[in-house]
Each structure stands twice: as structure tokens, then as C-alpha cells.
Image (spheres, rainbow, N blue to C red):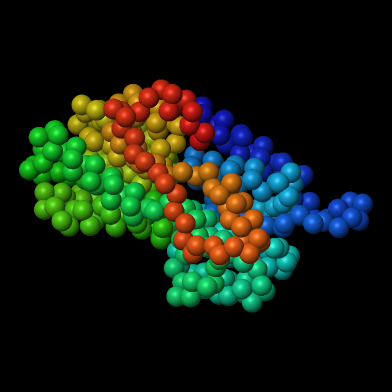
Amino acid sequence: MRRWISLLLCLLALTALWGCGSAAEADGEKNDRIVVGFSQLGSESDWRIANTRSMTEAFCEENGYQLEFDNAKQKQENQLAAVRNFILQGVDIIMIAPTEETGWENVLTEARDAGIPVIIVDRSVAVEDESLYLTSIGSDFLLEGQRATEWLTDELEKQGRGDEDVNILHLQGTYGATAQLMRTKALEDAAAENDRWHIAAQLYGDFTEAKGYEAVRDYLATDRDIDVIYSENDNMTFGAMQALDEAGISYGVGGDVILISFDAVHEALEKCLAGQINLCVECNPLHGPRVDELIRRYQAGETIPKHIYVEETLFTPDTLTQEIVDNREY
């Protein structure tokens, strides 16, 4: 239910853009608002919906902006077309939450040639010339994964299983996305250093609940010998939980399978507090006010760092409280 409420709020925020993003003043007065184009990669998860809501709320007329918004529906070709459209419109600033890291050089060069600064939001882009964009802001996905694997090491020791073989089922997000690449790297690096850790399979879940469910359901039909599920976002975790329930396999605190999940959205924290998820790794989506501040600093002539990372934490059933869950904004 909460996910449907979040989706409704997001749709209401996008509807409000008709008021925030009209192209011209009706009475002919000069429009002195900052015109920003935002290419959002999609709406595949609770996290993404919260991210869109944060951005649309920050970049509205009341804050001095005119927002041109495009939902790429998780297709890079849609994003490239949207960015080129922003360039043709002559927006003041372009913001991109990229579907994947590669394939951006040409369009970023076009933006630079047009004199339009670009801010990369949430994920990263892999380009040889980093001057093609102004700055990037988001999470340190590699550090997130490293902290998760360090926690797993400690948890297995606490359970007296530090010297046992451990089979890890790895649910991966959209291939080529920064979150997928770095969270995957962290797990693979940790498994390479621990000969007791075995990545039983790496399954494609595309950061969605439906595909996470299908991937785990199909895997369990042939192999039920798993000790850990390392899921690269909460929605895939919810799907995995459904598949485990249908297979009659217990999970969470005291269960057969340890669940590690990334993002820590409200519903995931509720499940963690209830002991159904062992570890929630925070990934904060509320970038709107942060990017707004960066733009104002840039326009004031300040030097902007090339990469800005958000501080985040870990949640377990032992560290969570009902107050933390209730105060979660996403």
C-alpha cells in the first residue's frame, strides 16, 4: 500500500510540473527563472519514485525554477534524445540520472559546446574527459557494498559460521548502472578474499520487484541450497521474499537465509525492524535540495567539487527503532 501511495504522490508532483514548467510568461513579462532540464532514468522502484519527488519539489516555480522533466523509462536512447531536446530548448542547466555509465561522451560534448553545464545525479558516467560535466552527486555505491560484506563477515562470526562454506545468491540491478557495478564489485572482491564464500548465482532483477521475484523463484526450482541473498535494492528483495515464502524457506533473524538489501526505503525498514531483513544498507534518494544548493553555489561563482557523496548508514533489527521507521521520508 505504501508503494502505491508513493507512486500517487509522485504522479501528483509530476502533474504540478505543468505549473512549474510552462515555457513562457502569459503576459509577456521576462521569465527570470532558472530553466533546468532533468532526464530521470525511470520509475522502476520506490527509491526512484522518492528521488523524482525530491527533484520535482525542489525545482519548481516557487523556488525560482522552470523544470523540463523527462522519464526515460529505463532506456538510454530515451535519455540521449531528452538531453538533446534540452540543448535545443536552450535550458540553463541539465541534470541527468543516467541509466548506465557508458555512452555519454557525444551528448555531453554537445551540451558543453552549447555552453550548458551538466550535473550527474545519483549514478555516475564513465567518460575520459570529466570536464564534460560540472559535478556528480550521489552515493558511494562501492563503499555501500563494502560495508555490507564487512557486516556479513561479522554476522557469520557471531553465528559461529565464520569457518563454514556460505552460498550467496546475488540479485543484480540494471546492468551497467553504477549501483549495480559497484555493489557487484564489492561482493565479488569480498568473495575472492574469502574461499568459504561462494557466489552460487548472479541473477538479473533490473531493480524491480517483479523481476526479483521471477529470478529467485526460478532459481529455487532447481537449487535451494542458499545461505545469503545479497540484493542490490529493496524492491528486488521484496520479490525475493515472496519467492522464499512460496518455497517454504525461512529468512531474516533466525531464518535459513540471511537477507542483505540496499536502499533502506520505508517498507524495507519496517521489514527489518520486524526481523524479516537482516541488513538494510542506506542509499538516500533525496537529492533535490542538494542539487538546488549546488546550482546556487555555482551561479554565485563558487568552485564546485567534481564528486560529492552523501553520508549514509546501516540498519539492522538491533539498531532500528519504530521512531526511525516512522520518520522515514521515503
Q: Position of residue 2 (x, y in %)?
A: 51, 29
Q: Residue at 19% of width from left, 31% of height from top?
A: 256
Position of residue 298 in the picture relative to residue 76 (left or right): right
Q: Hey, which quadrant is residue 216 in on the image?
A: top left
Quadrant housing residue 157:
top left
Task: Looking at the picture, tell me which residue is in the foreground, 112 or 302.
Answer: 302
Q: Residue furthest right?
A: 27
Seen from the viewer's position, the closer of residues 199 and 58 is 58
Residue visible at 15% across and 56% down? 193
Q: Is residue 57 visible?
A: yes
Counting every numbered tag in the picture gives: 0
The answer to whether residue 206 is above or below residue 9 is below
Percent of width and height locating residue 222: 22, 42
- In depth, the one of 143 and 162 nearer the eye is 143
Query: Can the viewer see residue 219 in this picture?
Result: no
Dividing the picture into quadrants, the one containing residue 110 is bottom right
> Relative to residue 199, is residue 178 drawn left or right?
right
Which residue is found at the position 70% from the left and 41% from the top?
15
- The answer to whether residue 247 is above or below residue 148 is above
**Residue 191 in picture, x, y percent from top left:** 19, 53
Q: Position of residue 60 (x, y in %)?
A: 70, 46
Q: Which of 78/66 is in front? A: 66
